[in-house]
């Protein structure tokens, strides 16, 4: 059991999300940085899809009511376990009564507090992920509140404390041209790949809004609503791109200039509000190699865990 003592962020319960339901208008949701969540769960010996607490930027303080292992992945937080500093990408032992304070994210946006065995929660549409729009999943479909108690599936066998290589954060995000790429003016195609883009403060789990050089179509384009997904780069009439994120709707009607590759979705999620990034074009073959590189990283964690256990 874990008690929530203080919350200064929109912390939610997230697993890897809901799949196979988009035809019904149900969003994927799930962790913004799925690679970080998978890494944390593997480090603890959990199944990769076990739910964790996703903490964006701000702080959260909680108390462990029983002995268990835990780790934090994703963003690099300033953290204390009682009076001892703890660090991201390390598996620690917490004793009953100890208090973990995640004060603030120093680097990155989303931290994942994973615990041994995971949290025991009812599933909604085959997932424990919190969907704030439909108010399902997690704890009553809402953000965590002070006083919440989270049941854990702890096995009471503490593992040794070990660390792993962190996932590097990036300020260059790789992408592929999308279906309406050729509908944009040549200069806009050039701006997209060559110019810098600043993440706006009105961004959220549904969409990251960027500001930069205006992107223009060759001619007005009327489109029927069509399927979109995490990573789709839509360009509304303002000419300022919006990248759809984990909580994105299932359909949209704006032209798409690009799609962020699967391997870099987590890196995109970790971009800080107000930060400036660039986009780099890659081929389908390169995108597949980069995705495989992420899987190799997770395989390395599995080997470390097997050796240390």
Image (cartoon, helix red, strand yellow):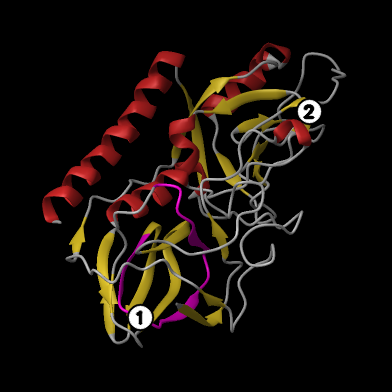
Q: In which quarter of the image is the N terminus?
A: bottom left
Question: Is 220 situated left or right of 207 in this image?
Answer: right
Which of the two residues, 127 or 99, is positioned nearer the viewer here? 127
**Element type at mark 2:** loop
Residue 228 numbered mark, or none:
none
Question: Is 292 situated left or right of 151 in this image?
Answer: left
| Mark 1–mark 2 distance (CA, rounded to whole Å) | 50 Å
In this view, the residue farthest toward the top is: 182
> Residue 193 is drawn in which quadrant?
top right
Q: Position of residue 107 (x, y in %)?
A: 41, 59
Q: Where is residue 255 in the image (x, y as percent from the top left)?
A: 75, 23
Q: What stretch is highlighted in magenta?
A: 48-72
Which of the two residues, 301 or 127, is positioned nearer the viewer here? 127
> 220 above or below 63?
above
**Element type at mark 1:** loop
For disc 2, the marked residue is: 254
> Residue 252 is drawn in which quadrant?
top right
For disc 1, the marked residue is: 66
> 233 above or below 170?
above
SS majority, magenta: strand
Neighbour class for label 2 at 10 Å: few (<14), some, many (≥20)?
Answer: many
Label 1 or label 2, whichever lies nearer to me, is 1
Q: Is residue 237 magenta?
A: no
Which of the two residues, 126 or 62, is positioned nearer the viewer here? 126
Q: How many marks?
A: 2
């Amino acid at each position: 059991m874990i008690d929530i003592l203080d919350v200064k962020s929109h912390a939610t319960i997230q697993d890897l999300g809901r799949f196979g339901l988009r035809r019904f208008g149900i969003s994927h949701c799930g962790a913004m940085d799925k690679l970080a969540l998978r890494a944390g769960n593997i480090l603890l010996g959990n199944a990769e899809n076990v739910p964790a607490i996703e903490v964006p930027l701000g702080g959260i303080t909680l108390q462990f009511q029983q002995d268990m292992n835990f780790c934090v992945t994703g963003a690099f937080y300033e953290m204390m376990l009682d009076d001892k500093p703890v660090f991201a990408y390390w598996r620690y032992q917490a004793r009953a009564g100890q208090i973990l304070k995640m004060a603030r994210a120093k680097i990155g946006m989303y931290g994942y507090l994973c615990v041994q065995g995971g949290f025991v929660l009812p599933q909604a549409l085959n997932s424990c992920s919190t969907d704030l729009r439909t108010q399902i999943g997690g704890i009553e479909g809402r953000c965590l509140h002070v006083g919440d108690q989270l049941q854990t599936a702890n096995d009471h066998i503490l593992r040794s404390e070990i660390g792993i290589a962190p996932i590097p954060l990036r300020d260059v995000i790789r992408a592929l041209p999308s279906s309406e790429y050729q509908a944009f003016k040549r200069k806009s195609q050039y701006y997209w790949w060559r110019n810098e883009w600043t993440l706006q403060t009105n961004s959220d789990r549904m969409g990251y809004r960027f500001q930069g050089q205006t992107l223009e179509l060759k001619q007005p384009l009327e489109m029927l609503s069509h399927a979109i997904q995490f990573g789709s780069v839509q360009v509304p009439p303002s000419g300022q791109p919006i990248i759809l994120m984990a909580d994105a709707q299932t359909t949209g009607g704006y032209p798409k200039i690009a799609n962020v590759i699967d391997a870099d979705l987590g890196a995109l999620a970790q971009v800080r509000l107000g930060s400036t990034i660039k986009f780099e074009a890659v081929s389908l073959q390169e995108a597949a190699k980069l995705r495989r590189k992420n899987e190799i990283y997770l395989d390395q964690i599995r080997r470390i865990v097997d050796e240390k256990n």
